[in-house]
Image (cartoon, rainbow, N blue to C red):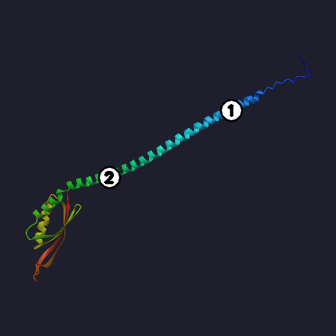
């Protein structure tokens, strides 16, 4: 037995092809999304790297600031030591002057004169003392003028005065004198 189907056959229609611009748009969108995702990941990694570098640089900056502060402290310490060294060298250089000064003043001191006060300020010496006679004071000033250590000798004052010695009521007439000396060298 043969069967014949006379009913029209429903044929499956071929689907209409998808237009090319839609396919191109989908492919372009996928490529752009992949590119954006790739760029996003790269930028995220670069941000992490830059933040790590920033943290490291901030740490180095703090270390450098500490070292700079230590260096500044060292420089001030060096300046202080240099200044002290200069003072010490100057003191050593001028060390012999007081000895020479006292030697010159005492070797020219005649009998009948005694010193009460001696002040040294810079290159100036102020002396005060007593003498039995005014001529002894003049002799002393003339001797001091001949000394190579003094570049100027000036008798500032010489006046008669009476003083009492050792609690006795007897007064002794003396001359109170003041001499100003300029020290050379």
Residue at position x 61%, y 38% from top? 40
Q: Residues within 10 Å of mark 2 (few under 14, many from 20)?
A: few
Farthest residue to the top: give it. 1
Q: Is 15 situated above or below 139?
A: above
Task: Depth check: give the residue in front, 1 or 123.
Answer: 1
**Residue 8 occupies quadrant:** top right
Q: Residues within 10 Å of mark 1 (few under 14, many from 20)?
A: few
Q: Is 65 situated above or below 156?
A: above
Q: Earlier in the sequence, mark 1 or mark 2?
A: 1
User: In the rendering, at what x and y percent does residue 77 appear?
Assistant: 32, 52
Q: Is 40 situated above or below 136?
A: above
Residue at position x 64%, y 36% from top? 36
**Residue 114 occupies quadrant:** bottom left
Which is more foreground, mark 1 or mark 2?
A: 1
Query: Could you say which disc has been placed on residue 73 in the image?
Result: none
On the image, numbered disc 1 is attached to which residue?
30
Q: Secondary structure at mark 2?
A: helix
Residue at position x 22%, y 56% from top? 91
Residue at position x 17%, y 60% from top? 98
Answer left or right for 13 relative to 126: right
User: In the rendering, at what x and y percent does residue 16 appear?
Assistant: 81, 26
**Quarter of the image where the C terminus is located:** bottom left
Q: Secondary structure at mark 1?
A: helix
**Quarter of the image where the N terminus is located:** top right
Query: Could you say which disc has been placed on residue 77 in the image?
Result: 2
Answer left or right for 109 relative to 89: left
Question: Marks 1 and 2, how far apart in space?
Answer: 69 Å
User: In the rendering, at what x and y percent does residue 52 appear?
Assistant: 50, 42
Task: Depth check: give the residue in front, 176 or 165.
Answer: 165
């Amino acid at each position: 037995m043969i069967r014949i189907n006379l009913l029209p056959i429903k044929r499956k229609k071929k689907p209409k092809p998808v237009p090319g611009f839609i396919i191109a748009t989908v492919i372009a969108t996928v490529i752009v999304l992949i590119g954006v995702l790739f760029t996003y990941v790269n930028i995220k990694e670069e941000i992490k790297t830059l933040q790590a570098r920033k943290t490291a640089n901030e740490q180095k900056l703090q270390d450098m600031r500490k070292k700079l502060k230590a260096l500044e402290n060292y420089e001030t310490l060096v300046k202080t030591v240099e200044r002290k060294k200069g003072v010490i060298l100057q003191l050593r250089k001028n060390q012999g002057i007081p000895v020479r000064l006292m030697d010159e003043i005492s070797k020219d001191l005649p009998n009948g004169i005694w010193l009460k006060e001696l002040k040294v300020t810079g290159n100036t010496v102020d002396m005060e003392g007593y003498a039995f006679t005014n001529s002894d004071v003049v002799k002393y000033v003339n001797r001091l003028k001949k000394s190579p250590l003094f570049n100027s000798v000036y008798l500032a004052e010489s006046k008669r005065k009476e003083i009492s010695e050792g609690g006795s009521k007897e007064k002794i007439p003396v001359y109170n004198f003041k001499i100003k000396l300029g020290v050379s060298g």
